[in-house]
Amino acid sequence: MLGDKIVVKKHHTDAAAGVYEKIKQKVTGGSRTAITVAGESGSGKSEIAHEIGRIFYEKNGFRSVTLHQDDYFIRPPRSNDEARRQDIGNVGMHEVRLGLLDEHIKEAKKKDSVTLKKPLIDYDNNAVLEEELDLAGISIILAEGTYTTALKNADIKVFIDRTFMDTLEHRKERARDRLDEYTERILKIEHEVISLQKNEADIIISKDYTV
């Protein structure tokens, strides 16, 4: 997402290193591997996905590309926030084009796929744009987002087991979310959905970021 930022800290790097040790034998570079990183808002999904990609490149020379679930929201951020505030029923997996994200993972995993056109959210301008990713030489497709454990075309699913209350300080640091009572209601609804996906994960990152 344009306008987003990540804040990588030691615990993100340590968690990613733990994931690497668990899955390094499964990622050979001979075929493209899709890895999802899921968890609640502010749990460090973007940071840990970034670090997983970096570690694989440094240790194995495997290049990666990351698909961000935020780019697949039907509405841009401010419009989506207003829709949620008008009707709390708008909160949930149906806000996201998860089917399209899953299809893009499937397409990106093909060795003969050299480019991928995907949506791109422009946060500052509240707009949905399009970008083309270069897949040449890519060995790993990372997909991060709240609901990415539900994606069927993932090969390895990582889940960060932290609640929305655990992640409050990180969300404040990121300074992207509008934090108020209504936001807390939204996060509780998301928690109910996301927590059900935990059992589908291959690797769990615990509350203290250990694997």
Image (spheres, rainbow, N blue to C red):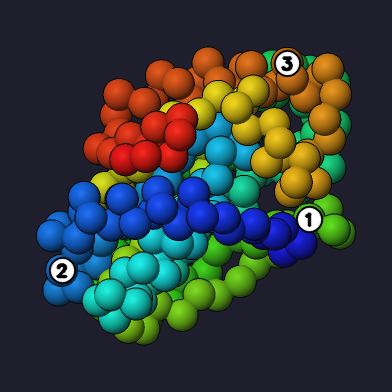
Secondary element at tag 3: helix
**Badge 3: few (under 14), some or many (20 or more) residues near its Cα, within 10 Å?**
few
Secondary element at tag 1: loop
Q: Tell which of 85 and 16 is nearer to you.
A: 16
Give the residue at mark 2.
Answer: 28
Give the residue at mark 1.
Answer: 123
Q: Residue furthest bottom?
A: 136
Q: Amino acid at mark 2?
A: Thr
Who comes first in sequence, dot 3 or dot 1?
A: 1
Q: State the CA–CA distance, disc 1 to disc 2.
A: 36 Å
Secondary element at tag 2: loop
CB atoms of marks 3 and 1 within 8 Å: no
The N terminus - image quarter: bottom right
**Badge 1: few (under 14), some or many (20 or more) residues near its Cα, within 10 Å?**
some
Q: Amino acid at mark 1?
A: Tyr
Q: Amino acid at mark 3?
A: Arg
Image spot of residue 7 (x, y percent): 64, 57
Q: State the CA–CA distance, disc 3 to disc 2.
A: 43 Å
The C terminus - image quarter: top left
Image spot of residue 55 (x, y percent): 36, 68
Q: Residue at x 45, y 34 (%)?
A: 208
Q: Is residue 205 visible?
A: yes
Image spot of residue 61 (x, y percent): 29, 81
Q: State the CA–CA distance, disc 3 to disc 1.
A: 22 Å
Q: How many marks?
A: 3
Who comes first in sequence, dot 1 or dot 2?
A: 2
Give the residue at mark 3.
Answer: 185
**Which quadrant of the view contains residue 4?**
bottom right
Q: Residue at x 74, y 48 (%)?
A: 174
Is 124 on the left-hand or right-hand side of 147?
Answer: right
